[in-house]
């Protein structure tokens, strides 16, 4: 996820936010040095002007600058993005690793989360969200017939269910683990290589949710991810065999 502030902007905003009075460039430079951040006075001036233009800071005549509410919000957003990017890097290290066994950890995590989100979604999903799932299924069918990638739709389908659960913690966990496009595309390529055909699981999950059958929705979701696990293990077996033959 693209950061909204660079490291100097975040540091300067934090320094000003921690002060109960306006701060000038020389004080900010001194505070930065205390944090072992070397930056010229000219650069500080440019950063301050940019932050002020973005309404993150407000100039108090000749006293210096104070942080605004927009500035405090920007800090919170920047820190959230850093956390998300940190977790994304960890997951990407797993997904891009040559050790394909690690795929199973991702699927296990998804299974633990998604069997809960689908149950809650069955309770709380709106008609608008049901219509959205149906539209996703229609697009998937068309793309499948045309041998086009359905990675985007795969992500959107599960993401919609997570949102419909009305549990922001589970939704956030799902978004961290399973909404990276690279991950979904890798799984899609993997299924193709083990000749696992496009399944009807999404349609079955949708029908169970629409019917309001929580247990059925949970069981189908688990079976859906269990089959994905089988595909991973099948691909891993072929990969190991090919290494042995070489």
Image (cartoon, rainbow, N blue to C red):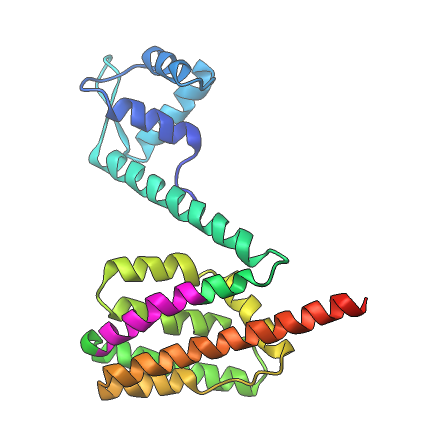
119 relative to 179, above or below: below
Residue 64 located left or right of residue 159: left
Whether residue 150 is visible here, answered yes or no, is no
Q: Main secondary structure of the magenta part?
A: helix
- Report the side of 120 relative to 202 (left or right): left
Q: For the C terminus, give its image quadrant.
A: bottom right
Q: Position of residue 227 (x, y in %)?
A: 48, 79
Q: Is residue 241 left or right of residue 99?
A: right
> What is the magenta range?
108-122
113 in the magenta segment: yes
Q: Residue 149's spot in the image, x, y percent?
A: 55, 75
**Can you say whether 179 is above or below 53 in the image?**
below
Residue at position x 59%, y 56% in the image: 96
Query: Which of 230/127 is in front?
Result: 230
Residue in view at x 33 percent, y 82 percent: 219
Q: Is residue 73 magenta?
A: no
Tell me the quarter of the picture where residue 194 sits. Answer: bottom right
């Amino acid at each position: 996820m693209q950061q909204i502030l660079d490291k100097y902007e975040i540091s300067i905003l934090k320094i000003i936010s921690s002060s109960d009075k306006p701060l000038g460039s020389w004080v900010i430079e001194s505070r930065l040095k205390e944090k072992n951040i070397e930056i010229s006075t000219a650069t500080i001036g440019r950063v301050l002007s940019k932050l002020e233009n973005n309404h993150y800071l407000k100039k108090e005549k000749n006293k210096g600058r104070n942080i605004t509410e927009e500035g405090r919000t920007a800090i919170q957003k920047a820190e959230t993005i850093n956390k998300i990017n940190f977790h994304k890097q960890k997951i990407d290290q797993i997904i891009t690793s040559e050790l394909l066994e690690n795929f199973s950890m991702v699927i296990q995590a998804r299974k633990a989360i998604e069997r809960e989100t689908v149950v809650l979604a069955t309770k709380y999903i709106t008609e608008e969200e049901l219509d959205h799932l149906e539209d996703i299924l229609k697009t998937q069918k068309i793309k499948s017939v045309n041998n086009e990638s359905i990675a985007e739709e795969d992500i959107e389908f599960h993401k919609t269910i997570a949102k419909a659960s009305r549990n922001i913690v589970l939704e956030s966990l799902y978004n961290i683990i399973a909404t990276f496009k690279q991950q979904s595309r890798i799984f899609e390529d993997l299924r193709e290589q083990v000749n696992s055909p496009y399944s009807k699981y999404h349609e079955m999950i949708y029908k169970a949710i629409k019917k309001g059958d929580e247990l059925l929705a949970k069981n189908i979701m688990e079976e859906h991810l269990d089959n994905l696990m089988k595909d991973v293990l099948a691909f891993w077996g072929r990969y190991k065999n090919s290494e042995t033959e070489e």
